[in-house]
Amino acid sequence: MKYKVVTTWVVDVSEAEVQRAAKGYGQDVNPKQLAVFKAMQKSIEVTMGEGTWDEWVSVYFDVTPVTN
């Protein structure tokens, strides 16, 4: 059977985090890009058993069977 899995990430990004990242990289940082980075980083940590989900990053899965 085939399934379509849609993943929704919920990530908190504070203005302070954006400013710290911009200072560290020496250029402006897009908050959306920082959110993607945080979601990917947390996913890798959890997958490798080095982290757990917390109140700052959550993930939701919608699974639908594919009939073709």
Image (cartoon, helix red, strand yellow):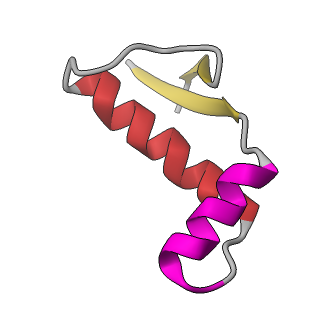
Q: Is residue 16 magenta?
A: yes
- Which residue is nearer to you in this view: 39 or 14? 14
Q: Position of residue 18 (x, y in %)?
A: 70, 60
Residue at image location 64% in from the left, 24% down from the top: 56
Is residue 29 rendered to the left or right of residue 66? right
Q: Position of residue 23 (x, y in %)?
A: 59, 74
In the image, residue 60 above or below residue 9: above
Residue at image location 48% in from the left, 15% down from the top: 53
Q: Could you tell me what secondary structure mostly forms the magenta stretch?
A: helix
- Which residue is nearer to you in this view: 5 or 1? 5
Q: What is the magenta range?
A: 15-27
Q: Quadrant of residue 54?
A: top right
- Which residue is nearer to you in this view: 43 or 17? 17
Residue at image location 61% in from the left, 21% down from the top: 58
Residue at image location 40% in from the left, 42% down from the top: 41
Is residue 51 rendered to the left or right of residue 65? left
